[in-house]
């Protein structure tokens, strides 16, 4: 029991920070991986967020969005996904050549297909 051993030292993993890949819904991520393989190249550096027009005016973060998609933490994604203006600036600066704009488009498609979300 790792948790119990850690308790002996006065700390434990916060439940809210645990990521359960087994239980999380990875359908959105899988759909993107299949249709835009460059998504696998993302190293979560944040370069896209730094240049993002929406991100400079609101709390929107493309990097954070990508992390949540990969984790399958989809509940927090949809409202933010709609904020992207599809301007493509993030795609121009990505050091890994990730087609970020297309990933946003595919994520929207995947949400609409799987959950009947309306844009
Ligand atoms: S700039 Fe590219 S590699 Fe960096 S977080 Fe954005 S998509 Fe990922
Ligand atoms: S395409 Fe979307 S995420 Fe990328 S810079 Fe433009 S508004 Fe930001």
Image (cartoon, rainbow, N blue to C red):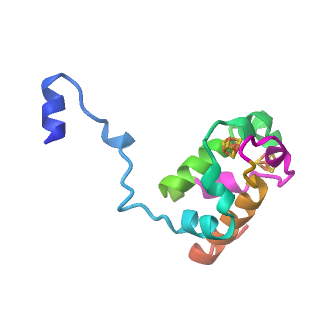
**Residue drawn at (36%, 62%) of the image:** 23
Q: Position of residue 11 (x, y in %)?
A: 23, 26
Q: Is residue 11 above or below residue 31?
A: above
**Residue drawn at (13%, 36%) of the image:** 4
Bounds of the magenta span? 77-96
Left or right: residue 4 compared with residue 96: left
Q: Position of residue 99 (x, y in %)?
A: 76, 55
Left or right: residue 11 compared with residue 41: left
The number of discs equals 0
Split into quadrants, the picture shows ligand 1 in the one at top right
Q: Position of residue 96 (x, y in %)?
A: 71, 45
**Residue drawn at (49%, 58%) of the image:** 72
Q: Quadrant of the N terminus?
A: top left
Residue 82 on the magenta span: yes
Q: Quadrant of the C terminus?
A: bottom right
Q: Position of residue 9 (x, y in %)?
A: 17, 22
Q: Is residue 31 above or below residue 70?
A: below
**Residue drawn at (12%, 26%) of the image:** 8
Residue 40 on the magenta span: no
Left or right: residue 69 compared with residue 21: right
Camera-nearest residue between 29 and 85: 29
Camera-nearest residue between 96 and 86: 96
The image quadrant of residue 47 is top right
The image quadrant of residue 31 is bottom right
């Amino acid at each position: 029991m790792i948790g119990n051993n850690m308790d002996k030292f006065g700390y434990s993993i916060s439940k809210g920070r645990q990521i359960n890949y087994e239980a999380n819904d990875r359908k959105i991520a899988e759909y993107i991986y299949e249709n835009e393989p460059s998504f696998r190249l993302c190293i979560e550096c944040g370069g896209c967020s730094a240049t993002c027009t929406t991100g400079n005016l609101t709390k929107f973060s493309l990097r954070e969005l990508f992390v949540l998609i990969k984790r399958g933490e989809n509940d927090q994604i949809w409202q933010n996904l709609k904020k992207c203006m599809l301007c493509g600036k993030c795609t121009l600066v990505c050091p890994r050549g990730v087609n970020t704009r297309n990933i946003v488009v595919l994520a929207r498609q995947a949400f609409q297909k799987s959950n009947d979300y309306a844009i």
